[in-house]
Image: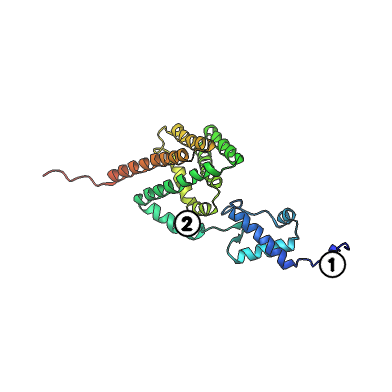
């Protein structure tokens, strides 16, 4: 049988290559390797990673932008699109306009994040678990509210990534700005009133349950943590309403 000459085999067209590149990027988004809001590597780096030409990468990026998966970043570059840009403004205004809406959002977080923690306990890689432990250690060492807020947010996002659900990552991105505001409030007085150590223990319980692959305990730890947060919000709401109430008229 004569040897085949690979040089005579039909070569893939540039269009087919760009479609393959687009599918590779979509697969990364679907696996949660590229999360909503994340900036993609540059064209040259992507071309090197995928072993294709920059022309093919450019065509693939343009296709995904047209389809609404990616968007251009001011100053250059591309990032993954989420629904956050559409929802954030209205949702933030709604939550800020009424204290009961804020409490509703915490209850919704309890349902979503307990599910995510359960999934993380079952699916997290050893590297992701180690990352959670690193963030937790940083929460105890960080000085100043700004650093604690960033570490707290990093922890919740890391749990979301460990859950391995791009759908959940997109849902989280939709309330990301509001979540940041909520977390920031958790680390300020009078909300904390000396409870910083307790908050860290709440996160430690979540981490330890995920690390030992105990899905039920992970979900329960999130519920306990956010249940405490909800109780604090409700108590503060009652205090604010009492303070805002006009004084009763003097008895006749």
Q: Residues within 10 Å of mark 1 (few under 14, many from 20)?
A: few
Relative placement, left or right, of 188 versus 98 is: right
Q: Residue at x 74, y 63 (%)?
A: 55
Q: Say which mark, if any, is on residue 46.
A: none
Q: Secondary structure at mark 1?
A: helix
Determine the residue located farthest toward the left in the rendered image. 252
Q: Are marks 2 and 1 in contact (CB under 8 Å)?
A: no
Question: Where 174 falls versus 196 (above or below)?
Answer: below
Q: In which quadrant will I find the C terminus?
A: top left
- Which label's residue is closer to the chain start, 2 or 1? 1
Q: Badge 2: few (under 14), some or many (20 or more) residues near its Cα, within 10 Å?
A: some
Render colour scheme: rainbow
Q: Secondary structure at mark 2?
A: helix
Q: For the residues marked 2 and 1, what is the alpha-carbon distance in whole angstroms?
A: 55 Å
In-front residue for pair 146/231 = 231
Depth check, front residue: 14 or 125:
125
- The residue where tag 2 is placed is 88
Q: Residue 58: x and y, percent? A: 70, 63
Looking at the image, residue 24 lies above or below residue 218: below
User: Observer-nearest residue: 181 or 251?
Assistant: 181
Number of marks present in the image shown: 2
Which residue appears at 62% of the width and 58% of the height?
26
Residue on which disc 1 sits: 8
Where does residue 138 sit, x and y in percent of width and height? Answer: 56, 35
Q: Quadrant of the N terminus?
A: bottom right
Q: Residue at x 88, y 62 (%)?
A: 3
Side of 186 relative to 22 (left or right): left
Q: Position of residue 134 (x, y in %)?
A: 58, 36
Left/right placement of residue 218 relative to residue 50 reads left
Where is residue 208 shown, x and y percent of the image? 51, 35
Residue 187 seen in the figure: no
């Amino acid at each position: 049988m004569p040897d085949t000459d690979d040089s005579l085999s039909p070569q893939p067209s540039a269009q087919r290559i760009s479609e393959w590149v687009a599918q590779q990027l979509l697969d990364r988004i679907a696996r949660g390797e590229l999360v909503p809001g994340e900036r993609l590597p540059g064209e040259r780096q992507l071309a090197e990673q995928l072993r294709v030409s920059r022309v093919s990468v450019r065509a693939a990026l343009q296709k995904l932008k047209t389809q609404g998966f990616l968007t251009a970043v001011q100053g250059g570059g591309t990032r993954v699109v989420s629904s956050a840009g559409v929802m954030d403004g209205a949702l933030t205004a709604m939550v800020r306009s009424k204290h009961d809406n804020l409490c509703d959002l915490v209850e919704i977080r309890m349902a979503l994040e307990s599910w995510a923690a359960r999934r993380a306990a079952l699916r997290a890689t050893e590297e992701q678990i180690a990352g959670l432990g690193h963030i937790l250690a940083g929460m105890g060492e960080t000085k100043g509210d700004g650093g604690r807020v960033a570490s707290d947010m990093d922890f919740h996002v890391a749990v979301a990534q460990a859950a391995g659900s791009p759908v959940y990552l997109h849902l989280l991105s939709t309330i990301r700005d509001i979540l940041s505001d909520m977390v920031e409030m958790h680390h300020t007085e009078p909300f904390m009133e000396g409870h910083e150590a307790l908050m860290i223990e709440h996160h430690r319980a979540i981490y330890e349950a995920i690390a030992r692959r105990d899905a039920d305990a992970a979900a329960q730890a999130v519920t306990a943590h956010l249940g405490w947060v909800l109780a604090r919000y409700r108590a503060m709401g009652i205090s604010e309403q009492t303070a805002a109430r006009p004084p009763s008229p003097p008895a006749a």
